[in-house]
Image (cartoon, grey):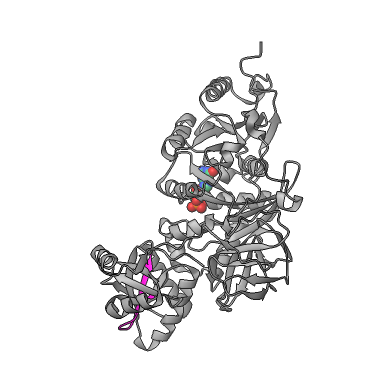
Amino acid sequence: PAPAYICAPMLDAAQDTPTNRPDLPPEIARRRTFAIISHPDAGKTTLTEKFLLYGGAIQMAGQVRAKGEARRTRSDFMQMEKDRGISVSASAMSFDFAGPGMQYRFNLVDTPGHSDFSEDTYRTLTAVDAAIMVIDGAKGVESQTQKLFEVCRLRDLPILTFCNKMDRESRDTFEIIDEIQENLAIDVTPASWPIGVGRDFLGCYDLIHDRLELMDRADRNKVAESVKMEGLDDPRLDDHIPADLLEKLREEVEMARELLPAMNRQSFLEGHLTPIWFGSAINSFGVKELMDGIAEYGPQPQVQTAEPREVAPEEKKVAGFVFKVQANMDPKHRDRVAFVRLASGHFQRGMKLTHVRSKKPMAIANPVMFLASDRELAEEAWAGDIIGIPNHGQLRIGDALTEGEALRFTGIPSFAPELLQSCRAGDPMKAKHLDKALMQFAEEGAAKVFKPNIGSGFIVGVVGALQFEVLASRIEMEYGLPVRFEASQFTSARWVHGGKEAVDAFMAANKSHMATDNDGDPVYLTRMQWDIDRIERDYPDVTLSATKELM
Ligand code: GDP
């Protein structure tokens, strides 16, 4: 009979279920584009540093922070961001990783950390193929983890879980796994199992590769010592683990194998099952295994939904979409960078692409990739990559770039603003500048901006209250313009659709409610739900919509 504790990797035979997708060209197949989601303080920054460390992008972790700081002062240069420790702007970083069998290219897209930026976050997640969920081993699933997870679920994103801070007192392993399963309604399969708790934490048993991984507390940047084992019955385990901890490990793993599902690639890809690794980012522990997991399980660049057809990564022609616009990344140059996720093809610098919305050709002369150290010119890029395209405002969120085909990528929504405030320049002489600043933020997707047809000033709409403060602070920093946000009589905004005559008649009869958005489209500002009900009754020829599809 098989020894009781032989621990075959927790892999399901079904994990290699062939998908009906063709093999991707090697350059595309080696790409992994993902985001990290977590509650503030769980260790996202630390984990990112260690990723870059293993990616060979930097010599020593710690440099990133210093560099990150420098970059932050240059790119976001927002005191508020520092004060509150929130990350307002998203960016993308690329680095290589020597994973199992080959060199991988990881594209890590940073998600804004605060719950008030849900719209931004949602858009960011349209650009990735997977997400890493970082949780604190002592705190478990926290509020922000939960929210971000829900956003991932809307897109059925595959999730890999990293349970961090295992070097500290943490919760019982089963309790952590149960909490994830209960609160997030997702199955969890252990990729590794922690040995010992807190001060007695020794490391993990790698259940996928049958290896003992030992944490080195003395050198925080050292890759863990790894000992290949013949399953959990291997007598050499005694050399490394005290008897009581070893017994506990064997018992727990046996229980885990009875109670928890095995790794199954298909349910992982569908977002129903998450593998969990235990580790300590600050001690560089468990990070390499997590990266191996991203490399092995992927996923590779995925098919993107679009109209009138889907776009597959292996297609020869280049197509991509803008998921983020960031302005004033460099205060010296009033440039904007549009972040584009390449959905297909092999992009080369200098290519002429069609800007689908305006039907105009655009020569992409200076695309940038954000390598760990700094921006660099992107000579080439493949499906799955994120490139930044500096521009003067032509590129907007949701825009498609193709080699001529009129594609529209779907699934990048524009959310209805839930909070409206009026905005005035502190100095009335500077109203023109305010106009310009607000238009910029509208284009970035940071706010909805409405110019009432009657009267002066602007109505600004956001999804979360903190965004007003962020805007005020950015307008002051970037335009030297103090502004005031004040309560508005309006509570909500609706875009007006219909035949020209019907819309004109509607606008004439409702002047005091009418405004235009930054594209010049008519918007009806409501004071109460009753307004909307009344219009639906009185104007059957116009429709009011809460969102404006990004075209
Ligand atoms: P973020 O807010 O999610 O980006 O979290 P940070 O990476 O900034 O980490 C928050 C705090 O937790 C910092 O003080 C880190 O030094 C600390 N930290 C991160 N990883 C670990 C870990 O594995 N163990 C311990 N003990 N502390 C950690």
From the top left corner, tell me how far across and down residue 70 is, in percent: 57, 66
Among the 4 quarters of the image, the one containing residue 539: bottom left
Q: Is residue 90 above or below residue 505?
A: above
Could you say which is closer to the camera, residue 532 or residue 274?
A: 532
Q: Vertically, is 438 above or below 25?
A: below
Where residue 496 appears, x then y in whole percent?
37, 71
Q: Across the whole image, how many numbered discs are drawn on residues?
A: 0
The answer to whether residue 171 shows anywhere in this view is no
Quarter of image, res 114: bottom left
Q: Is residue 129 above or below residue 14?
A: below
* Residue at the spot 32% in from the left edge and 83% down from the top edge: 456
Q: Residue furthest bottom?
A: 429
The location of residue 6, given as percent across then percent down, is 64, 20
Magenta-span inclusion, residue 290: no
391 in relation to 281, above or below: below
Question: Residue at 65% of width from left, 42% of height from top?
Answer: 288
Is residue 452 on the magenta stretch?
Answer: yes
Question: Magenta region, mostly helix, strand or loop?
Answer: strand
Q: Residue furthest top?
A: 1
Q: Is residue 290 left or right of residue 490?
A: right
Give coordinates of residue 55: x percent, y percent: 68, 51
Q: Is residue 512 left or right of residue 318?
A: left
Q: Is residue 1 left or right of residue 480?
A: right
Q: Quadrant of the N terminus?
A: top right
Q: What residue is at 37 percent from the left and 61 percent from the top?
A: 464
Q: Find the magenta span and give its range.
A: 450-462
